[in-house]
Amino acid sequence: MTTTTTKNLLVELFVEELPPKALKKLGEAFASVLADSLKAQGLTGADAAVTHFASPRRLAVHVTTVDPQAADKAVSQKLMPVAVGLDASGNATPALLKKLQALGADASAVAGLKRAPDGKAEALFYDSTVKGATLAVGLQKALEDAIAKLPIPKVMTYQLESGCELPGWTSVSFVRPAHSLIALHGADVVPVQALGLKAGNSTQGHRFEAKVSPVVLKDADSYAATLAQDGSVIASFAERRAEIARQLAAAAAKVGGGCKPIDDDALLDEVTALVERPNVLICTFEKEFLDVPQECLILTMKANQKYFPLLDAANKLTNKFLVVSNINPDDASFVIGGNERVVRPRLADAKFFFDQDRKKTLESRVDGLGKVVYHNKLGSQGERVARVRAIAKAIAAQLGDATLVAQADQAAQLAKTDLVTDMVGEFPELQGTMGRYYALNDKLPVAVADAIEDHYKPRFAGDTLPRGDVGVVVALADKLETLVGMFGIGNVPTGDKDPFALRRHALGIVRMRIERQLPMTSGDLVDIAFAAFPRGLIGEAHTDVLGFLQDRLSGYLRDTGYSSAEVEAVMAATGRSSWADLPKRLAAVRTFAALPESPALAAANKRISNILKKVDGDVGIQVNDALLIEPAEKALVTALKSVAPVADSAWAAGNYTESLQALAALKAPVDAFFDGVMVNAEDPALKANRLGLLKMLHVAMNRVADLSKLAT
């Protein structure tokens, strides 16, 4: 390096095509780890701007204000206890001299050693200055860290090219074979190496449209502009993504009719990772394919071809689709025609599957489920369906009439039959969706058809719930069967591992119970589910399943914006009873917590709870007025008799906010009671009477929520 001034740094690894679904994370991780390492070594400041680049064939990072060498650093190093390092005469012991020698010092350094307390003893400390790392050394370490910590989905091992600068190496492991390395500090090449490559100042541009090869960079700051100009590559992932989105919108507007490309962030990210110079083209397929359910056509175009289907103003699929090409020829007709020829067989397959599947009813496929293995310990899908039917009928009997029971039973029987259709065999993502289409084709009730599709819902966080009562019943039954079955054979989620998505199933149950205001308790539902399993098939896990549901409930309520204290207060009061009114209780608790009387009442309630817990045996809810001696306890009883009926009446009417607000009037008499009354009186009768008063107060204050949980 020929300069000693702060400059910007550019590092690029040029490789073969990177895995598209991982590219965004790879680019972000490469940049952040490398920059963090430079900052940790003092080669750049904490406020340095870091820009990451990621294209199908490159990972790069630009870091501002990087020093050619880090500043020297003063360090104080503990050597050993004074008693070990110095003898009785104050001379250095052999142990101390050996330690100093290891640090590059000699006996002359003994006089400069510092003494300082270290626990119970006094220790010797050696002050020295560590020379700051040069950029070449620091960047080498940062580069190695960045490569080692990349979130690589699958590592490749490949042979190094002949003429490699690292003699003796024969192979290397990385996400894809690497071909060149750039490391520029300003205009100067930093002499680092990685993956068998020596750093330079050149890279490759677009495979077909680069204007020059190689693309030579004059300095770190010209990277993006030079690649765009000479290499025909948009290096920035974010800029390339934005350009694709812009072109997609423009192409849809050109088609007209209110058309818009399908909204799919994951697809947009993947396509961004597949092209270096995007060029959106409009393509067409035959309208006859629109007779196939649009979900099938959309899925095959997205999953297999990475196309963007076009929807009309009513969100119906059109026979137009958009292709993001990686080349920009003067005549795009060959590219358009090629893509149209490629998609046609895919759509024809979907149409064939749809036509063939409709030749058999869903009911005729029920027996086929007996040949499909669900789990080696839990039997076939046919056996599972029998359990889901039993659970669904039992739930429906408690929630509705005979019609709901019959339709829930039918939907549960047919819900999995589309698993043995050709369409779902080809596109598993369409399970449920195709079942609904085939049910309507069989002239089944719409409620049953909807339930067949909806029994998988909610599939993910934020997903909609089943649209009807039949769907809710079957979805509950399906998720309960999964939970109970898996817990019953010991397949319980651990840490981040949840292969059977039991947390998602439990959260779905929580959401349906609360958002659909179902009156059934967790105990009722879990008992019904366990009863559906043959004796001996699974173990006893009632408590574990109930606790698991309770945990998911707590998380769900916190995710809706309530604090842990508010959630704990409400859950402690409701236990495992019906959850239908939890939102109202939480809203009431939040309103109560905002009252000026709230902190004192919460603290008093906690004190009352602690007093009652220490009492042997049960405390009766009764007060003998004749045993009320102190003015403060008389005043509290009078206030309680006035407030309790108002709070109880509001609670019975479901007006939890008003019920809690009524308790605010108790603050002054409660405070006075604890200031002026000895609860644990020597007279047993007085003590029992005062405990009864506290019990009465405790019950009145905790019907909506356990207010002691709000105490800080």
Image (spheres, rainbow, N blue to C red):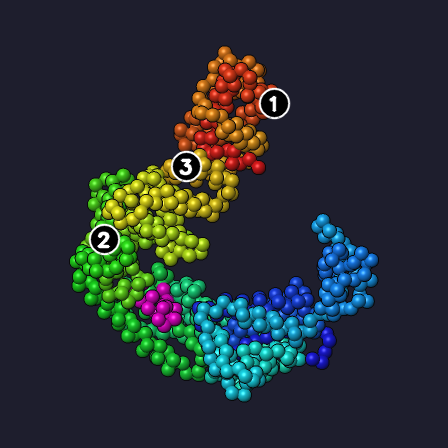
Q: Is residue 564 above or below residue 12?
A: above
Q: Which residue is mark 3?
A: 575
Q: Does 353 appear above or below 484?
A: below
Q: Earlier in the sequence, mark 3 or mark 1?
A: 3
Q: Secondary structure at mark 2?
A: helix
Left or right of 121: which side holds 191?
Answer: left
Which of the two discs, 2 and 1, labels the residue nearer the N terminus? 2
Q: Amino acid at mark 2?
A: Glu
Residue 633 sits in which quadrant? top right
Q: Residues within 10 Å of mark 2 (few under 14, many from 20)?
A: some
State the CA–CA distance, disc 2 to disc 1.
66 Å
Q: How busy is the neighbourhood of tag 1: few (under 14 within 10 Å), some, or many (20 plus)?
A: few
Residue 157 in the figure: left or right of residue 444? right
Q: Is residue 327 left or right of residue 406?
A: right
Picture quadrant of residue 665: top right
Name the image quarter holding residue 93: bottom right
Residue 622 location, x and y as percent? 45, 19
| Numbered tag placed on residue 383 in the rendering | 2
Question: In the rendered image of this protein, does residue 341 appear above or below residue 78?
Answer: below
Furthest residue in direction front, as rendered:
88
The one of 53 and 615 positioned closer to us in this rendering: 615
The C terminus lies in quadrant: top right
Instruction: Name the mark nearer the viewer: 2 or 3.
Output: 2
**Residue range (magenta):** 295-311
**SS at circle 3:** loop
The location of residue 389, given as percent across then percent down, is: 24, 48
Q: What residue does disc 1 label? A: 675
Query: Mark 3 belongs to which amino acid?
Result: Gly
Q: Earlier in the sequence, mark 2 or mark 3?
A: 2
